[in-house]
Image (cartoon, rainbow, N blue to C red):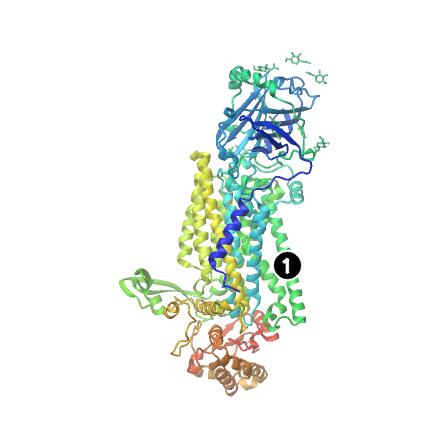
Amino acid sequence: MRTPSLISISGACIFLFLSLLLRVEAASSSDNKQWIQYTNADGETLYLDNNREPALYAQDYGDCQGDSIVNVTRFDAAYYKDNMTILFHLEGSTAVANESVMMYIGVYAYGESRFTLMFDPCFANIHSMCPINASVPIEASGIIPIAPADVAGIPEIALSIPDFEGQAILRIFANSTQSQIACYSAVLTNGHSFSHPIAVGSTVGVFVAIALVSSVATAIYGQGLQETRKHYAHSLSVFVVFSVLQHVFFTGALSMNFPSVLVAFWSNFGWASGMIYSRGMQNSINQFIGSNRGNISMVGSAPSGQNAVNLGGGYSPSMIYKRAIGLLDTIESESPSMHKRSLINSTSGFSWYGNPVAPGLPLPGNYSSFAGTLAELHIPASNAFLTGLLWFLILIALLGVSVAVAKVVVELLVKLKAIKTDRLSFFRKHWIYCGAVIVLRACYIAFFMITFLAIFQFTIGGAAGTLAVAGIVLALALLGIVGLAGYALWYRMSGQKFQNDPDQLQLKLSTAGKVPRLGWTRKSTAAKMEDSRRTVVSLPWRHLHLVDPMDRPHVHDDDDYLIKFGWLSARFRRSKWWFFAAWLVYELVRACFYGGAAGHPLTQVFGLLAWEILALFTIVTMRPFESNRLNMLMVYCLGFSKVVSVALCSAFDPRFGLGRILTTVIGIIIIVIQGVLIILMMIAVVVGAISSYMSVRRYQEDFHPQSLANTRTKFFTHLEHKATDKPLAKAVTNAKGAVLEEPKQPYFSITSVRRETKIEDEDLENENENENENDFIENDSRLSMDANQQPRDKRASAAPSVRSRTSISNLPYGARRHRASWSTRDFHNSGFDPEQIPSGMHSRMSIESIRDGSAPKSTAGVRQTWTANPSLVNIANAAVNGSSPYRDRHQKSKSLNLT
Ligand SMILES: *[C@@H]1O[C@H](CO)[C@@H](O)[C@H](O)[C@H]1NC(C)=O
Ligand SMILES: *[C@@H]1O[C@H](CO)[C@@H](O)[C@H](O)[C@H]1NC(C)=O
Ligand SMILES: *[C@@H]1O[C@H](CO)[C@@H](O)[C@H](O)[C@H]1NC(C)=O
Ligand SMILES: *[C@@H]1O[C@H](CO)[C@@H](O)[C@H](O)[C@H]1NC(C)=O
Ligand SMILES: *[C@@H]1O[C@H](CO)[C@@H](O)[C@H](O)[C@H]1NC(C)=O
Ligand SMILES: *[C@@H]1O[C@H](CO)[C@@H](O)[C@H](O)[C@H]1NC(C)=O
Ligand SMILES: *[C@@H]1O[C@H](CO)[C@@H](O)[C@H](O)[C@H]1NC(C)=O
Ligand SMILES: *[C@@H]1O[C@H](CO)[C@@H](O)[C@H](O)[C@H]1NC(C)=O
């Protein structure tokens, strides 16, 4: 198998994506085609399918005058360019007994009136409207031949541009009062759209599924928590994937007057934010919320069924009746050619028409605010919160079921001896715990969505029941998720103290790269990192930092913490492990701006812009993830896209009065930016799947495809290095694609040692060790397993790749036996008195990895961890001892339960 190059992957992704977006839907072919004959202006005779797709046609329509006297049950209009015809159908009823009317049909596109037709139904063979009569149902249809001059306002591009932004507006005026008695507006389309929720949604869904599987696989596979964490941190985060997808969709939650292209584009990603239309679910929600649907005018939408004053540029009846005489002349002269056409529906062939919009939706053709974005998915804004909540609960249930299914599959595979038992033993023993962690993680990911939707519900108002549910869910999210994250911080930070040390801020000049670079560093950091750059300027500084008087291991080295809160902290760098809490605060503020300020568009959009810019700069300086790919995607790409999207969207505020064509152009720029972001995410998912595959095959000597074996070696070296959270050493950067050479000089790689204790320090505690021999015999057997691994040593001498793999596990084979025998002997010869340990406490000893066999014993740093919570350590120990993932030769730390 050849190495899949990044370019070909990205090329394929881009092609797939664009072809999906621009897919032109072929007209449904019908068996019984009716051909009509038409002779055009040039005298050519054309044979046209009677049921072909019109160049422009009306889709769903809504009432734009709250108290329309005429009830329209069918309204469609179509413009056929090939035979220069406009067709329209109208069906309805009225309660008025005797009223002569005038009709107006207008096409309003991209903010301008493009075509108007005004006529007296009596001259157009529409007898059911001449006059309108309560006992006669209205049935009007017409075939209107037009001249090129009539449609000069509709440029050619309008017929091919995706998501043509136009409305067909029907107005009926009463002669007696000279006022409008009915208004209906239908959205116009040319059949091309960026909205392909099923095609795009399922494609992106496949990528999300790949990301989910590869992330979960790295999380549950492995022989030690800390090693598993390292590999998990480099798989692609589902959290990042959803952050990207939700960012794209929820940009549509700004209370702006969006162009149709954007809303159509966003509709492809609604599913990732819980906005999935299902008729059954919507009906149930409608029943629950009753008639109180809140007020979407609050957020700048144009609700259907209310008077839309300025629709289509507005129209004053007095103008009609003044201008009528001149206009009627032209219509009258044309009226003989206005034929009647039978009202046909999709069963009888004509399929290019829409239906009245459901209650609660905005007027079709108006894409303002979140209500407009949701309308593209046929979900009323009033139902958004409950829809999102229900789908989220369904997702939780699905996740629970999948974990159970995974458990069954794993057990089956173990029975069939298809997989090694010990590497999935943690999952097999604690699958319920794993399921709970996955559900908690889902809650963490959904935090923004749920809080935003709940706050948005409060903004638009609605039925008391809905508001109560929103309140409860909001409180649960705040108390539950924020509370948990706060507890995770407190659990580690409590007892830590702030210390304010004098320090120096140094401006350093780096000449290592091609371009010399300047950068600020603290002197203490520079000393820690062995920064050899030249100092240019030095300023006095104070360094405020936390000190842990209890000297606990770092959260990434602490099995207890990994078990409890690893689902929050595991992906972040050592120095930024607390980033999950910062992110929650960031998301909460965003949700408040999006939801709470929705009624004040300018506050919302500029407040958000300021917050996103602040967040971008803060997060870029942090680069919180351990994995470079995640930093790239989440910090740089997502951050950039968020800032630019909000900044560009701010131009859509109706107050700025931007032209609709310019609005559409800006919309396409946003689509390009967000589309590129999605494509990058897809590429990251593919690369992440490959790296996760490497992670999962880390215990195997041979790796297929062979061509990636070197990459795997480099990846593992990189991974080990990233886990230390130190800048890249020169030796690593200098290796030009070749396999990294083992350093000539022996050196030690000790990941995070808080306090290095001398062996002598431990003597006191080790004195009475023999009393507790049972524990140590078990331990002994485990430790000595290392020495007995004959096959390993054989392979070590045979396969060159072992060298690299050794550096991966941080355990050089040369050192193993030496260390094992040393530890065993040491433990046996020294005494250890469990009585000296306060009751209820556990001691866990971790033997740090030694890089080279010649290491002095004292640097082995026998480390002791005290923890006041026995139960969780028991879980950890049970996990470790039961089926013992630690029993493997790759062990790094050992836990002893001493009580
Ligand atoms: C143009 O095509 C439409 C749809 O096929 C048809 O209904 C209409 O009669 C045609 N117009 C003329 C003038 O033939
Ligand atoms: C329009 O139709 C709906 C139901 O189809 C009915 O409830 C309403 O009263 C009608 N309005 C008028 C003005 O006829
Ligand atoms: C309305 O229609 C009924 C039945 O066709 C007819 O008897 C009545 O005269 C009509 N009313 C008007 C005002 O045309
Ligand atoms: C309907 O109204 C018109 C004028 O308002 C009147 O001339 C006509 O006689 C009326 N028709 C009926 C059947 O009442
Ligand atoms: C309604 O008013 C228009 C304009 O004033 C007039 O041309 C038309 O004949 C009137 N319709 C009827 C049925 O009287
Ligand atoms: C809805 O909100 C708009 C704008 O805030 C306000 O003018 C209108 O009166 C409200 N409608 C209802 C029914 O409360
Ligand atoms: C949609 O409706 C809002 C509120 O009535 C209005 O400000 C906006 O201009 C409308 N948008 C379009 C595209 O007509
Ligand atoms: C479609 O039209 C046919 C005949 O015109 C009619 O029998 C049928 O009920 C109509 N169907 C719908 C859904 O309106």
Residue at 67 percent of width and 65 percent of height: 408
* Vertical placement of residue 258 versus 869, above or below: above
Mark 1 belongs to which amino acid?
Gly
Q: Position of residue 812 (x, y in %)?
A: 47, 78
Q: Quadrant of residue 216?
A: bottom right
Q: Quadrant of residue 622?
A: bottom left
Image quarter (top left, top right, bottom left or bottom right) of the C terminus:
bottom right
- SS of the residue under disc 1: helix
Q: Residue furthest front?
A: 44
Q: Position of residue 341 (x, y in %)?
A: 65, 25
Q: Position of residue 802 (x, y in %)?
A: 49, 76
Q: In the shown orientation, is residue 605 left or right of residue 34?
A: left
For the residue pair 322 and 556, the one nearer the viewer reads as 322
Q: Position of residue 488 (x, y in %)?
A: 51, 62
Looking at the rendered structure, the number of numbered marks drawn on it comes to 1
Q: Is residue 120 visible?
A: no
For the residue pair 796 and 213, the one nearer the viewer reads as 796
Q: Quadrant of residue 375?
A: top right
**Residue tagged 1:** 400
Q: Is residue 369 visible?
A: yes
Which quarter holds ligand 2? top right
